[in-house]
Image (cartoon, rainbow, N blue to C red):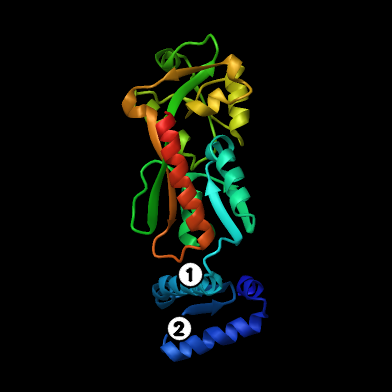
């Protein structure tokens, strides 16, 4: 209740009063109140999805009323770290030059966290990796990445890595799409004795790979643009494992601001140009 009051910029007693009024109008109890705090009843849990939808609808209504078709105002886009650092720079420069009234925010995360943020309405769109399932999202293909197996220069290939006594996988935290792919590749080859070493940034992973600490799996362009590229070896993978789609997602059925529509349109033009160049 305290958190709800803070978000609504009011006092707790007002929130409690509104909830009791709602319970009386519905004829059900939505929360159990006890010495240990407040917990939701079964009726409350059934109501929750409708409350979430209503909140999103009101949010969309406010955006629609204030949107006159000119891209302006805040625009929050989510992206994988590799996408933000190695793919979006030119597009961001072009977008901000064309639409100076848009306040663009790029926030990084994993595919799981980015997808959830779009569904919850925290981000207007996000770049995520791999196949995107479900009816809650609208998808636009952005580009295709080639994944490569990365070790220090002079070290062996993937098979040599698998045969090592204690192969070390240099990865980001849980939820990272490239980590999941690397783990699946190892498991499909019967390797169950690998040791995971987690890092906070891609640059830290590449630095440790170049020092011979272990191996990682990342897009080829990340290696090619890395300051560590002279001491890294990028090994090509079988075609069925090498390529992964990066998709731009928005919440299905949501009101899309003029800013995100312009961003998605520019993304489509940029993807076509990139595909032609490749």
Q: Nearer the viewer, mark 1 or mark 2?
A: 1
Near-viewer residue (127 or 271): 271
The N terminus: image quadrant? bottom right
Q: Earlier in the sequence, mark 1 or mark 2?
A: 2
**Mark 1: secondary structure:** helix
Near mark 1 (Cα within 10 A), the count class, few <14, some 14-19 or many ≥20, is some
Q: Which residue is mark 2?
A: 29
Q: Residues within 10 Å of mark 2 (few under 14, many from 20)?
A: some
The reply to whether discs 1 and 2 touch (Cβ–Cβ < 8 Å) is: no
Q: Residue 223 falls in which quadrant of the image?
A: top right
Q: Position of residue 220 (x, y in %)?
A: 48, 26
Q: Position of residue 240 (x, y in %)?
A: 31, 28
Q: Which residue is mark 1?
A: 56
- Does 87 sit above or below residue 158? below
Please, is residue 155 above or below residue 197 in the view? Answer: above
Pick out the residue farthest to the front: 98
**Res. 209 image quadrant:** top right
Q: Quadrant of the C terminus?
A: top left
Q: Which label sits on residue 159? A: none
Measured in 3D between alpha carbons, the distance from the residue under mark 1 to the one under mark 2, in whole angstroms, is 24 Å
Residue drawn at (44%, 17%), measured in percent from left and top?
235
In x, y percent, where is residue 142? 43, 42
65 versus 250 height, above or below: below
Which sits in the foreground, 66 or 56? 66
Which residue is depicted at the point 42% across and 87% down?
26
Q: Is residue 80 above or below residue 102?
A: above
């Amino acid at each position: 209740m305290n958190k709800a009051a803070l978000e609504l910029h009011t006092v707790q007693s007002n929130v409690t009063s509104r909830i009791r009024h709602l319970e009386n109008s519905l004829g059900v109890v939505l929360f159990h109140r006890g010495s240990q705090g407040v917990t939701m009843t079964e009726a409350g849990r059934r109501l929750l999805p409708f409350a979430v939808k209503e909140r999103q609808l009101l949010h969309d209504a406010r955006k629609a009323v204030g949107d006159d078709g000119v891209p302006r105002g805040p625009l929050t886009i989510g992206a994988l770290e590799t996408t933000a650092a190695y793919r979006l720079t030119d597009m961001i420069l072009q977008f901000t030059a064309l639409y100076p009234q848009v306040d663009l925010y790029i926030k990084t995360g994993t595919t799981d966290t980015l997808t959830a943020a779009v569904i919850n309405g925290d981000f207007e769109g996000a770049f995520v990796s791999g196949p995107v399932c479900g009816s809650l999202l609208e998808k636009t293909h952005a580009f295709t990445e080639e994944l490569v197996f990365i070790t220090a220069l002079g070290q062996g290939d993937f098979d040599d890595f698998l045969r090592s006594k204690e192969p070390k996988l240099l990865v980001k935290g849980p939820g990272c799409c490239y980590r999941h792919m690397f783990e699946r590749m190892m498991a499909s080859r019967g390797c169950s004795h690998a040791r995971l070493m987690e890092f906070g940034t891609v640059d830290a992973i590449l630095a440790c790979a170049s020092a011979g600490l272990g191996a990682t799996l990342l897009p080829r362009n990340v290696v090619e643009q890395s300051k560590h590229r002279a001491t890294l070896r990028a090994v090509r993978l079988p075609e069925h494992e090498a390529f992964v789609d990066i998709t731009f997602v928005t919440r299905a059925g949501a009101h899309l601001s003029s800013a995100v529509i312009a961003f998605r349109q520019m993304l489509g033009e940029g993807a076509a140009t990139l595909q032609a160049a490749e």
